[in-house]
Image: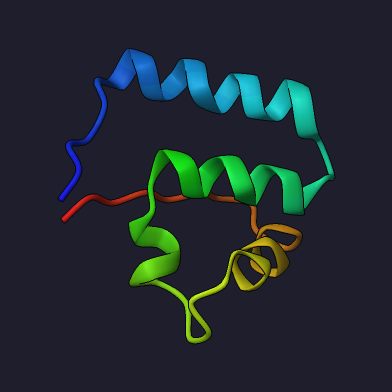
């Protein structure tokens, strides 16, 4: 079970991803998985980073959760 980061840390990480990856959803998904594994482990049907990456390509909102 992970702990959620402070709001200012979350903002810094999201800004970094936006500036670094832009449209590269697979690389962004790999880093998002390292930051919050629950998104793949509990939030995908196939339990794969590639499924999460496919969703990122069309998403305008990113969400995170830690159980």
Residue 38 spot, x, y in % from top left: 33, 59
Relative vertical location of residue 29 with respect to residue 6 in this rendering, above or below: below
Coloring applied to the structure: rainbow
Left or right: 24 as drawn, with respect to 3: right
Residue 13 spot, x, y in % from top left: 51, 23
Q: For the view shown, which residue lies furthest in the right direction?
A: 23
Q: Residue at x 56, y 72 (%)?
A: 48
Using the rendered view, name the quadrant where residue 27 is placed.
Answer: top right
Q: Residue at x 39, y 25 (%)?
A: 10
Q: Residue at x 63, y 20 (%)?
A: 16
Relative vertical location of residue 19 with respect to residue 26 in this rendering, above or below: above
Quadrant the C terminus occupies:
bottom left
Relative vertical location of residue 21 with respect to residue 52 in this rendering, above or below: above
Left or right: 64 as drawn, with respect to 56: left
Relative vertical location of residue 36 with respect to residue 14 in this rendering, above or below: below
Q: Residue at x 47, y 77 (%)?
A: 44
Q: For the view shown, which residue lies furthest in the bottom direction?
A: 45
């Amino acid at each position: 079970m992970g702990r959620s980061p402070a709001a200012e840390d979350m903002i810094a990480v999201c800004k970094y991803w936006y500036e670094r990856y832009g449209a590269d959803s697979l690389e962004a998904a790999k880093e998002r998985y390292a930051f919050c594994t629950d998104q793949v482990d509990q939030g995908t049907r196939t339990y794969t980073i590639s499924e999460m990456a496919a969703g990122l390509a069309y998403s305008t909102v990113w969400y995170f959760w830690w159980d």
